[in-house]
Image: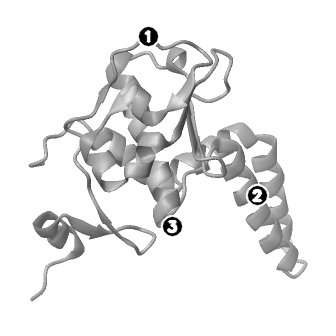
Amino acid sequence: AGMGSKMSGVATGWWKGTDGKFKYEISDEGMKLVDKEWKFGDKGKLGDFIEHPELFKAYPEFKDMAFEVGQKTDKYIASFNPNTSTLKINPSAIKSGDEGILDVIIHEIQHAVQNKEGFAPGSNPTFAAEEALTKLAEKIYSMPHSKTKLEAQDLYFQLRNNKDDFGQYMYLRSPGEIEANIVSARRKLSDEM
């Protein structure tokens, strides 16, 4: 008998993600913030702000990834822009100090990995809501006129009217966000776990 995907991941370090692609975990044990004062609006390279020997060994180009310290007024805590390969963080929105900042940075770095490797991407609440509402509208449009179609239209308008809550719900359930949240949660675990 063969090992299941969870057991083979434990034995080899490789596992198959929900997107059907094989993945390997990189140790975050040596990850830390560079000792420097962060100022809102600072820009530089990721390697100017963090040390992460294993990440930079596996993805040397990430050391030169654009990095920005956002403004207090930024809408999101952090983001990774795949079009510009820029990681942006708003440290004032993170209440758990350096450890929280590292958790947020590794979450966003995972989105950079997803982008580079062609894995399921991250999202944001606005995009997640729009994507789901568009798919629902297309499904409703293709339905024959019926009571079910009218009920589906009502559901569509209820979701659209509660787009912020619906977007947050869909965002937290997107495969790329789930994966990035797991990476962030596992950051503090030892390599043996």
Determine the CA span between mark 2 and mark 1.
43 Å
The percent coordinates of residue 160 (x first, y second) are 80, 47
Q: Amino acid at mark 3?
A: Gly
Q: Do the residues bearing badges 2 and 1 touch, measured as CB atoms within 8 Å?
A: no
As drawn, 79 above or below 96: below
- Which residue is tagged 3? 118
Q: Which residue is mark 1?
A: 37
In this view, the residue in front, 119 or 66, is 66
* Sequence order check, earlier mark of 3 and 2: 3
Q: Residues within 10 Å of mark 3 (few under 14, many from 20)?
A: few
Please name the residue shown 54% across and 58% down the image.
Answer: 121
> Does residue 144 lie above or below 155 as drawn?
below
Vertical arrangement, residue 165 with respect to residue 102, above or below? below
In this picture, residue 87 sits left or right of residue 142: left
Whether residue 68 is visible here, answered yes or no, is yes
- Using the numbered discs, state the Cα–Cα distance from disc 3 to disc 2 in whole angstroms: 24 Å
| Location of mark 2 (residue) | 133
Residue 172 at x, y percent in the picture: 52, 46
Judge depth for marks 2 and 1 and give the one in front: 1
Disc 2 element: helix
- Mark 3 or 2: in front is 3
Q: Amino acid at mark 1?
A: Glu
